Image: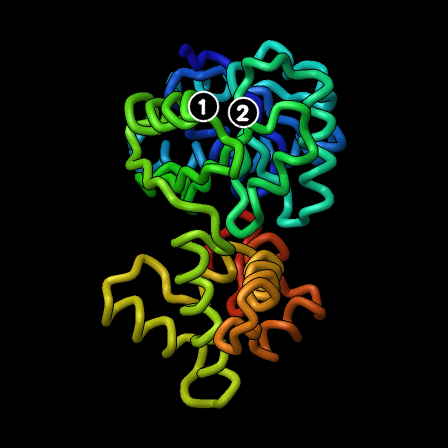
C-alpha cells in the first residue's frame, strides 16, 4: 500500500510534530483544524521547530521550504477523501473523538486507514462510531515525534489483520520507527507507566520532599532522562496527563492512578505547561524553558 498523502486532524503539539515528521519523509500532509486562526498558529509552530533545526545545521533552508510546502491547511473533512490514511490527534475526549470518526466515515472511502493517536482511550469504542470498524487502528506516537523512534500500534477488537500489517509496515519501513504491538488496555504501555512516574513526582513535590527543579534534576541526571518527569508533564500538557490518570483510575479502580492534588490544582488554574507558558516551570512562546 502506498502512503503519499496523509490527513492529520488536530494542530496541537502532537499534530504539529506528526505533520512535520511526515512531511520530512516526503509525504503530503493535509493538516485539519477547526478555524483558520488555529491552522495558522499550528503552521507557525512547525516553522519555528524547523528554524531551530536550521540554527543547529540539522537541515538546510531548501529542506525547510520543501517540508513546509508539503503541509497543506485544511478546515473541512471532505478534502481528506483522497488520503491514504488519516491520523486523528485531537484532545483526549472520547465523545469528541467519536464525533470525528463518525464524520470521517462520511467522507473517507472504505480503503482509507483511520488511525488515532490516543494514549488512553479504547480503539474498540472509537471504531464503534464508524461503519467500517475493521479499518480503525491506534498509532500512538511519543513526544517529541521526530526524535522518538517508537510507535505503539493498537488493535481494536475488530481491526483487520490487513490494516494492522499495512500500518506496521508503514511505521517500520517508511517512517523507520519501531512498531510495538499493544493489546488494547487503558494507557497501553508508555502512557500507563510514564503517567505513574509523573504522578509520583507530583506527590513528592506536594509533600515538600524536594523542589520541582531538584526532582527533575534527580531523575534527569540520575537516570539519563532527556527531561525530568515534571517537565515531561509540562510538554505533554498537564490537562492531558490529568485526563489520562483519571481515565485509568476509573478503568482500573486502583489508588495508584489517582491524580495528585497539585496536578489537579494546576489544571484548574489554567497552568497547563508549554502550551500556556507555565506549568511546573515557565516557557517562552517557542516552548523553551525560561
- Give the residue at the far front of this rendering: 158
Note whether 134 is above or below 256 in the view shown. above
How far apart are the alpha carbons under marks 1 and 2? 6 Å
Color encoding of the figure: rainbow
Note whether 286 is above or below 220 in the view shown. above
Q: Residue 183 at what x, y percent from top left?
A: 42, 46
Image-based side of 216 in relation to 75, left or right: left
Out of 52 and 145, give the one closest to the viewer.
145
Q: Is residue 211 visible?
A: yes
Q: What is the quadrant of the N terminus in the image? A: top left
Out of 166 and 159, give the one closest to the viewer.
159
Note whether 287 is above or below 247 in the view shown. above
* Residue name at image x 49 percent, y 62 percent: 233
Note whether 7 is above or below 54 in the view shown. above
* Residue name at image x 30 percent, y 75 percent: 218
* Residue name at image x 44 percent, y 40 percent: 154
Q: Is residue 278 visible?
A: no
Out of 270 and 157, give the one closest to the viewer.
157
Q: Are marks 1 and 2 in contact (CB under 8 Å)?
A: yes
Q: Residue 283 at what x, y percent from top left?
A: 53, 58
User: Which residue bears the numbered disc 1?
Assistant: 163
**Few, some or many C-alpha atoms within 10 Å of disc 1 (few <14, some 14-19, many ≥20)?**
some
Q: Residue 261 at what x, y percent from top left?
A: 61, 79
Count the marks: how many? 2
Out of 172 and 226, give the one closest to the viewer.
172
Image-based side of 184 in relation to 222, left or right: right
User: Which residue bears the numbered disc 2?
Assistant: 135
Secondary structure beneath dot 1 equals helix
Amino acid at each position: 500500500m502506498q502512503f503519499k498523502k496523509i490527513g492529520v486532524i488536530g494542530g496541537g503539539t502532537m499534530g504539529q510534530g506528526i505533520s512535520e515528521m511526515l512531511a520530512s519523509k516526503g509525504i503530503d500532509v493535509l493538516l485539519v483544524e477547526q478555524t483558520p486562526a488555529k491552522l495558522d498558529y499550528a503552521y507557525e509552530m512547525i516553522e519555528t521547530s524547523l528554524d531551530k533545526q536550521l540554527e543547529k545545521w540539522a537541515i538546510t533552508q531548501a529542506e525547510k521550504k520543501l517540508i513546509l510546502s508539503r503541509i497543506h491547511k485544511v478546515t473541512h473533512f471532505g478534502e481528506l477523501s483522497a488520503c491514504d490514511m488519516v491520523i486523528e490527534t485531537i484532545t483526549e475526549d472520547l465523545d469528541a473523538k467519536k464525533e470525528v470518526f463518525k464524520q470521517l466515515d462520511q467522507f473517507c472511502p472504505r480503503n482509507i486507514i483511520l488511525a488515532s493517536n490516543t494514549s488512553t482511550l479504547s480503539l474498540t469504542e472509537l471504531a464503534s462510531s464508524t461503519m467500517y470498524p475493521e479499518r480503525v487502528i491506534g498509532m500512538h506516537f511519543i513526544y517529541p515525534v521526530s526524535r522518538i523512534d517508537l510507535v505503539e500500534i493498537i488493535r481494536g477488537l475488530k481491526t483487520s489483520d490487513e490494516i494492522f500489517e499495512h500500518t506496521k509496515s508503514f511505521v517500520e519501513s517508511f517512517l523507520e520507527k519501531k512498531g510495538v504491538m499493544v493489546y488494547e488496555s487503558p494507557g497501553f504501555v508508555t502512557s500507563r507507566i510514564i503517567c505513574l512516574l509523573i504522578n509520583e513526582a507530583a506527590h513528592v513535590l506536594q509533600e515538600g520532599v524536594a523542589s520541582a527543579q531538584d526532582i527533575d534534576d534527580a531523575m534527569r541526571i540520575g537516570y539519563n532522562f532527556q527531561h525530568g518527569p515534571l517537565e515531561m508533564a509540562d510538554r505533554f500538557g498537564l490537562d492531558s496527563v490529568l485526563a489520562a490518570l483519571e481515565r485509568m483510575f476509573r478503568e482500573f479502580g486502583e489508588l495508584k492512578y489517582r491524580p495528585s492534588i497539585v496536578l489537579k490544582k494546576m489544571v484548574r488554574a489554567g497552568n497547563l505547561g508549554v502550551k500556556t507558558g507555565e506549568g511546573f516551570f515557565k516557557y517562552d512562546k517557542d516552548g523553551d524553558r525560561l
